[in-house]
Image (cartoon, grey):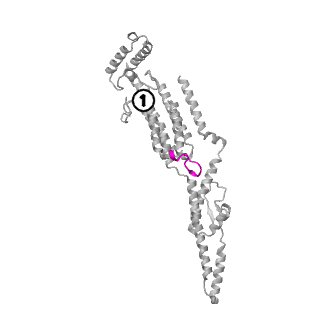
Amino acid sequence: MMESILIQGLVGSIIVYMVFSRGKNNLLLFPRLNKFRYIISILLCSSIIAYTIVSKPQTYYDIIQVDRWAPRTELVQAIRIAKKKYHPDKNKLDEKSNYTELFYEIQKIETVFSSETKRNNYNKYGDFRADGNIEDRNIILCLILGAAFHVYSCLFGLFLSFPSIFRKSRGLFPVYSIAVFCAELHMRLSDDPNPLSFLPVIGGLLPFEKIRVLRSLFTCVLIISFVYASNYYRDYDEILNGMLKGNLITNKRIIDLTQSLIVQLQTHGIGSTSTSSGQNKNKKKSNSTSSSNATPLPPKIKVDSDNEQEDPQLEVIQQLSEPLKELASTMNESQKKQLQTVLNIAFTAKGKENKKEGGGFLSRIFGSSFFWIILVGYVFQIIKNYLS
């Protein structure tokens, strides 16, 4: 079962990658497929559900052709009819070998259904042990295998969601795995013979059949979470660049208007040539003040830095290029605050990125999805060999 889920998840993820993959400049690589993204997702999930229904293995109730929750009298009658139907002495020679195997299988079914305890054990642990003989050791091993299955599935999903466009899905499919594992614990350990019978479609199935169906739906949940994450994906670096470009364009427009105003004043004049000495003095004072204001000190931008050894106040002359320094000298206070906010966000994100990239060798190994996938697979194989 685990192999089929991995194959389904891999194929479905490749198709979703093709639908939502992006290239340079954040453009879709297959825009035509993206137009039909919802139809493709529905077809993928429908195919997985159809495959789950078709590949459903036969249970003891299917072999003797009786309802799963039939009373004991109907079970005894159905077993008697099946034994007469598949008895080797009452069939042709060419079909005798097949009927012999079925006849021995029906005898096993009769042994299991002869006791109500064995029947309940089969209903809950039929995928683990079909003979109905369940001990505490078997229950613990069954639950450990169930936990290993869900951990391995989540690691597989984390590995497939490595691209940034799908990383938001990491908060969705692990929740489903945890919920299904809790449902497994309830169905395995509950005294109720038919737990979770209120579920639609699968409420009438045996407990171990419900567990199988819920596990198989993990691939559908994985695909749906990928579609959700890609639809709400936002490139925050592109947003910050857009904000900075908007501020630069706005300030460039202000500079152009100021220069045009200066040209108009120089063309039409700014006053009469015969001015009083007081006005000349005031003009000289204004010129001196304007000349002193013409070369302001470069403002300082406060940056939230993760490194405590660095100075949190970094001058613009150390952080910005020459054109941006000249532009900052022409800004008013509100514009400088906007530019300061943008730079703070950019520097903080860059500091966190550098801090993450500076991890040690061991942190890179244990932080890799490949390491945990290989480790869980190895443990799963050891348990499987031990049980066999």
Residue at the far front: name it: 32
Q: In this view, does 40 lie to the left or right of 286?
A: left
Location of residue 44 in the rendering, given as x and y in whole percent from the top left corner:
47, 38
Q: In this view, does 267 lie above or below 137?
A: below
Q: Kindly state the secondary structure of the residue where label 1 is placed.
A: helix
Q: Mark 1 points at which residue?
A: 209
Q: In this view, does 331 lie above or below 62?
A: below
Residue 347 visible in this rendered orientation of the protein: yes
| Residue plotted at (63% across, 67% down) | 327
Counting every numbered tag in the picture gives 1
Dividing the picture into quadrants, the one containing residue 207 is top left
| Residue plotted at (60% across, 67% down) | 252
Location of residue 354 in the rendering, given as x and y in whole percent from the top left corner:
64, 50
Dividing the picture into quadrants, the one containing residue 254 is bottom right
Q: Which amino acid does label 1 sit on?
A: Glu
Task: Count residues near mark 1 (Cα–Cα under 10 Å), then give few for <14, some for 14-19, many for 20+.
Answer: many
Location of residue 79 in the rendering, given as x and y in whole percent from the top left corner:
36, 18
Viewer-proximal residue among 340 and 245: 245
Q: Is residue 88 left or right of residue 153?
A: left
Q: In this view, does 355 lie above or below 342?
A: above
Residue 95 among those drawn in magenta: no
State which region is magenta.
21-33
